[in-house]
Image (cartoon, rainbow, N blue to C red):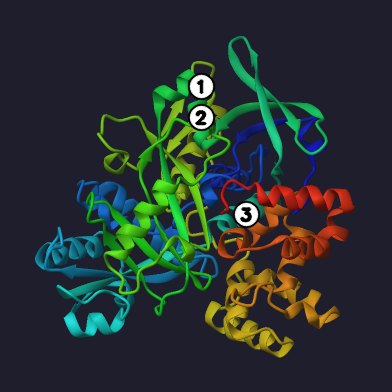
């Protein structure tokens, strides 16, 4: 993956996509696969905002059944099943527990009915994804850290998990391989219009401040929260802030879906990279779009609600990291953002520019296909969607189960511990062979960066060499999410910056700047 700002000039693109989150990535990838000449620009790093601040889930959204949003749930469940099949390295099954207490807002019978409907909305549901009911004792044995007072039993059901930032990155890589020009740290500074119709854009390279004009026949704005910055966007969008905390590991490899006692909202406790994600909050947001930070009140809320369920109370001292992001939702009259629809829509402005509004990571592929359908219709092109049931760019061509055994065997032979090997393979798919090649020249690179987390030094070095990282936070927040999963001190940051400095061309002054950038990263604690 190479960054080439100069490739944006001197040609006319069929489509310019602005915004390098999940919607922009899927749109660029699909359009490039259909044969369109595509440019994709992102003002920061890939997945630098909302698309790296999610709950890391690929799911139908069980809670949306209460609002009778069956269409959204069915669409998301279909995408979940397809992604599990087409990207087994990128999306993997995750089972959820649903405890039922004597004072639960939703009782056993209602929960059973809801889970039956959830399973029924999923086509060709496999047995290992179907829901199951447990009496009190077996459910408590499955989740021994849960408070047992008043526990009547519970259910488990299947959904799926991902690493959101790496999902976006893989799609960017796929778009590049299909011929798209994709440039991060490239800020949109204005539209170019001809006879009242948008015909391109002016952009600025945030690396060296060079400017360029991009000519394009069609333009899609998928800039998420920044769409709401204009008067037009404010009429279309509602911004909802969601906060997550990173907590110590719990003795389970399954997640929990829980209901907040104070306000009836749903929240999650999710295992991820050996730690625990606790979230999320829902609150309308009208603050600084470039600096979305975690509020102490949100930390207190999440800890208080989690501690109503777990035996050993968490305190602020247990919080390892935190992050906050903004969900963009369609403008609605719902009293609270938690009650607003998560569905997606496409708007077209008077000048012909298209705007992607709302949506979810899970269903972004299908939504993006409709965006590209619209673009193709405008261009008079009849090519159909190219991403449905398409194997992901980094998925191995061979049978996945057989390939996985061989990859783990290779990793073990090189000296990589089993847990690190599992996550390394999930992170890189078939490209893991390139990480193995780096290790063969220096076996010390198999060491973990942080003893408690499954990330090795060779992984970081490979990301620096081949994944279009510009700054240290790109590497330590989105390529490897170390800034939120560990408390890195200055010596840790200096060590890691020194490892990648020869690759990224940093001198001592640049290293100091990069370390300071990590300290001021808004999504780290």
Image location (x, y in percent) of residue 143: 31, 78
Q: CA distance from mark 1 to mark 2?
A: 7 Å
Circle 3 — which element? helix
- Answer with left or right where residue 244 lies relative to residue 380: left
- The residue identified by callout 2 is 227
Q: Looking at this view, is 300 or 212 the one in front?
A: 300
Q: Earlier in the sequence, mark 3 or mark 1?
A: 3
- The residue identified by callout 1 is 230
Residue 459's mark? none
Specify the quadrant of the image occupied by residue 235. top left
Image location (x, y in percent) of residue 166: 59, 58
Q: Is residue 324 above or below residue 208?
A: below
Image location (x, y in percent) of residue 103: 12, 63
Q: CA distance from mark 2 to mark 3?
A: 22 Å
Q: Looking at this view, is 116 or 302 the one in front?
A: 302
Image location (x, y in percent) of residue 105: 15, 58
């Amino acid at each position: 993956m190479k960054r080439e700002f100069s490739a944006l000039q001197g040609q006319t693109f069929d489509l310019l996509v602005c915004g390098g989150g999940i919607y922009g990535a899927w749109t660029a990838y699909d359009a490039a696969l259909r044969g369109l000449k595509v440019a994709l620009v992102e003002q920061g790093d890939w997945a630098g905002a909302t698309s790296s601040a999610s709950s890391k889930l690929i799911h139908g959204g069980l809670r949306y059944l209460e609002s009778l949003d069956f269409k959204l749930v069915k669409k998301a469940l279909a995408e979940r099943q397809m992604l599990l099949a087409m990207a087994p390295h990128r999306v993997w099954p995750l089972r959820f527990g649903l405890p039922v207490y004597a004072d639960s807002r939703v009782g056993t019978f209602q929960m059973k009915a809801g889970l039956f409907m959830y399973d029924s909305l999923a086509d060709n549901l496999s047995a290992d994804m179907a829901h199951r009911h447990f009496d009190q004792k077996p459910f408590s044995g499955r989740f021994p850290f849960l408070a047992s007072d008043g526990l009547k039993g519970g259910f488990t059901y299947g959904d799926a998990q991902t690493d959101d930032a790496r999902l976006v990155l893989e799609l960017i890589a796929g778009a590049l391989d299909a011929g798209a020009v994709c440039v991060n740290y490239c800020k949109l500074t204005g539209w170019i219009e001809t006879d009242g119709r948008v015909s391109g854009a002016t952009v600025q390279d945030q690396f060296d401040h060079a400017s360029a004009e991009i000519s394009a026949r069609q333009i899609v704005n998928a800039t998420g929260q920044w769409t709401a910055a204009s008067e037009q966007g404010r009429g279309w969008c509602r911004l909802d802030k969601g906060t997550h905390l990173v907590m110590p590991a719990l003795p389970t490899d399954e997640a929990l879906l829980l209901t907040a006692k104070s306000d009836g909202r749903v929240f999650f406790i999710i295992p991820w990279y050996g730690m625990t994600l606790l979230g999320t909050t829902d609150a309308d947001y009208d603050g600084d779009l470039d600096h979305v930070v975690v509020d102490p009140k949100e930390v207190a809320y999440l800890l208080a609600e989690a501690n109503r369920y777990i035996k050993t109370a968490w305190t602020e001292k247990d919080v390892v990291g935190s992050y906050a992001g903004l969900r963009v939702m369609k403008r609605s009259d719902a009293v609270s953002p938690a009650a607003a629809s998560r569905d997606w829509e496409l708007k077209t402005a008077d000048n012909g520019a298209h705007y992607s509004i709302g949506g979810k990571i899970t269903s972004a592929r299908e939504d993006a296909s409709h965006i590209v359908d619209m673009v193709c219709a405008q261009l008079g092109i009849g090519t159909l969607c190219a991403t449905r049931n398409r194997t992901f760019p980094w998925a191995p061509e061979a049978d996945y189960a057989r390939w996985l055994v061989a990859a783990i065997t290779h990793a073990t032979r090189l000296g990589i511990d089993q847990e690190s090997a599992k996550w390394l393979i999930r992170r890189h798919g078939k490209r893991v062979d390139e990480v193995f090649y780096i290790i063969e020249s220096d076996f010390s690179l198999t060491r973990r960066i942080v003893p408690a987390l499954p990330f090795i030094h060779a992984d970081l070095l490979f990301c620096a060499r081949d994944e279009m990282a510009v700054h240290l936070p790109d590497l330590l927040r989105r390529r490897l999410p170390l800034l939120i999963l560990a408390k890195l001190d200055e010596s840790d940051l200096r060590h890691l910056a020194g490892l990648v400095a020869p690759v990224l061309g940093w001198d001592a002054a640049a290293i100091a700047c990069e370390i300071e950038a990590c300290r001021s990263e808004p999504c780290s604690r």
